[in-house]
Amino acid sequence: MRRIQLQILPWVLCSIVLAGGIDVAHAQVELVASAAIAGDTPDSTAAKGELLGGFSGMAYAGEGDRYLLISDRGPGDGDSSYRCRLHSMEIRVQKQSKTLATRLLSTTLMQDDSGESFVGSLAALGKSRSGTALRLDPEAICISKRGTYFISDEYGPCVHEFDQQGRRLRSLTIPAELLMADASASSKEKLVTYGRGALPNAGLEGLAISPDRTRLFALLQAPLAQDGGRSGVHVRLVELGVDAPRTRQFVYVLDAPKLGLSELLAINSHQFLVIERDGKPGPAARVKRIYKIDIRGASDVSAQDSLGTTSLPPGIIPVQKTLLLDLLDRRYSIAGADCPAKVEGLCFGPDLPDGRRLLLVASDNDFLPEQPSRVYAFAVSQAEFR
């Protein structure tokens, strides 16, 4: 197991203002540490050559400095039979030495109801002994009050519940309008378009659980086909009951078409953090932002057949949106040659000794051995979450 330690970064006061009428917080945010985990780092399975890979989602395990991190469908964008998995990792901000240390503790393979491994292959349709598809593209993870794991599947799109041994327990019912009209087994999935439902490779990307663990909130990566697809800016946020079939839907308005949403994190029962970004790496990156949103006062759009491409129908109120953190602000030294294309993981850790909240942000390196996976640790004033 490898341990990675990098020097802590100096205190930063970030004050950001955007045009366009978006309410922007004058956020006191400090980047306290960052770590670069080598792309060729192995995971803890016995299989030779299995890489730790990038981090599509993360959750605090609730004790010590242990976190759960989830990798997506593996290398090759759906062309490989990579076995889907999640990791337990120690991520620790060390006060005296001012370093961020990471240590892989374990890797758990994910299995379906019959005990067969889920794989990232697009073609793994209907091959399970249980009669369901074996393909899975895990993108986010939350922990239930029972200690089980809720995981969003971009392929479905769907939300599954797994036990701690990685066995699927059930799948939650997703509103029909989110489902794809057809499931593609082609490696050219991004070129396939349908008139309704989630776009290929743009399903449920974010997942959050309410503090009382009774509700899940699932976030699409991009607008549904009927909401404008990649030309649109209206993305649906779906509320699901953990033990009841109640659902609501809200609309999040992107800053511009062709941007995407990567993760969702609950602050309380009505406020969340959202990653909005482009898919560009290095100096080409232009948008890597973390917004605070509030669903209070937002319209329930469950009955709305279409949200429109760039203009919402009359009377519909989107979620309130406030910029918390621009990762490309030069004060953080993230922008530039080493800026990751895919900033995807987001979670709170235990509060820091001075009372500030610890916010971790992680990147997905797409299993490229020459590219590191990065973890950034921010300290945020408690005042930003009131």
Image (cartoon, grey):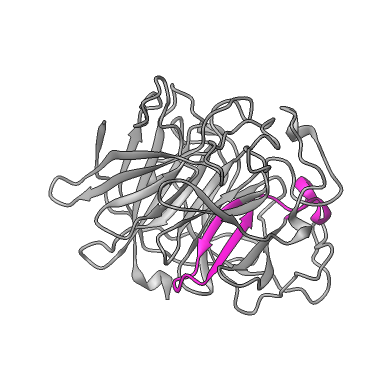
Q: Nearer the viewer, residue 346 or 24?
A: 346
**127 horizontally vs 274: left or right:** right
Quarter of the image holding residue 250? Answer: bottom right
Residue 157 x, y percent position in the rendering:
67, 50
- Count of labels in the image: 0
Residue beneath the point at 41% across and 64% down? 146
Residue 216 is one of the magenta-drawn residues: yes
Q: Is residue 329 above or below residue 367?
A: below
**362 horizontally vs 292: left or right:** left
Residue 350 is one of the magenta-drawn residues: no
Screen quadrant of the C terminus? bottom left
Quarter of the image holding residue 370? Answer: top left
Q: Which residues are magenta?
A: 205-233
Q: Residue furthest left?
A: 96
Residue 151 x, y percent position in the rendering:
53, 52
Q: Residue furthest bottom?
A: 297
Screen quadrant of the N terminus? top left
Quarter of the image holding residue 320? Answer: bottom right
Residue 45 x, y percent position in the rendering:
37, 30
Residue 279 x, y percent position in the rendering:
60, 38
Q: Nearer the viewer, residue 30 or 375?
A: 375
Residue beneath the point at 64% across and 37% down? 128
Residue beneath the point at 48% across and 67% down? 25
Q: Nearer the viewer, residue 72 or 348?
A: 72
